[in-house]
Image (tube, helix red, strand yellow):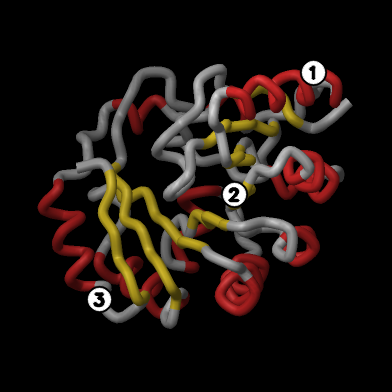
Amino acid sequence: MSSVYAYLEKPSMVDFPRKFAAVFFTSGCNFTCGFCHNAALIGKKQAGLSWDKLETACTKFKKNWVNGVVITGGEPTLADDLAEMIRFFKKFGFAVKLDTNGSNPERLAECLPLVDYVAMDVKTGFSGYPDLVRYANTDNIRKSIDLIQSEAKDYEFRTTVIEQLHTDSLMDELAAAIKGSKRYVLQAFIPRELLPDPKYSLLPRTPSSRLTALKTRMAGCADEILVRGV
């Protein structure tokens, strides 16, 4: 059995830049973000799909002009078979994008030569990690940032901004941590029902004015700064 827990039946045009992509999910995550939109995948690992079932899905996607695969979660670098999974998708001719929270630099280093694009969520400035995601080993986050900057074929760092929590000082700290990057994305927080921590469902959507202000404030941390979700 693979570590793929589920996949989207319809391909996506927004999850992999310049690709028409199939999106595959792994389960289990070592962060506990109260605002996670994939809440069903952040608990313990679930039983995965068979490789035969994945092959059937990939064959169907290939016939429908899909040219990319996104491996997301959950946190994919918790999967022992991640490198095997990437090679499996590659044999169909797919470009592969990996989504990660950056907590497992050793497995990330193993997989970087295999993937075509990496998107790493940098949740906040390092000092804010323990409160926001209940994770304190920011040395691993720093190692993953350095690895991606130096070794990834193409990549982005990204942050989902919650106006009440992502203060200017935390965002300045974040900008310093990713300085010299190729691409950085500011994403709007969008409240919805059934988030892991109900308090986040009561918060407002991040206003475009805040994202625009941060784009200006963080100018210089990356060659390209994008805003999504406005």
Q: Is residue 94 left or right of residue 217?
A: right
- Quarter of the figure with the C terminus: top left
Which label's residue is closer to the chain start, 3 or 2? 2
Residue 56's place in the image compared with 181, above or below, is: above
Kind of residue sitting beneath label 1: Lys
Report, in whole angstroms, how far the alpha carbon at label 3 lies from the one at label 1.
Answer: 45 Å
Q: Write the residue at 80% across / 47% down.
A: 87
* 48 on left or right of 210: right
Q: Which one is in front in this view, the residue at disc 3 or the one at disc 2?
A: 2
Q: Which residue is located at x 67 percent, y 56 percent?
A: 115
- Up/down of 118 relative to 200, above or below: below
Rendered image: mark on residue 97: 2
Label 1 residue SS: helix
| Secondary-structure class at tag 3 | loop
Image quadrant of residue 30? top right
Quarter of the figure that contains the N terminus: top right
The residue that appears at 58% across and 41% down in the rendered structure is 68
| Image coords of residue 223 (percent x, y) | 35, 76
Between the C-alphas of marks 1 and 2, the distance is 20 Å
Three-letter amino acid code at the position of disc 2: Lys
Q: Which residue lies under the disc numbered 3?
A: 219
Q: Which residue is mark 1?
A: 53
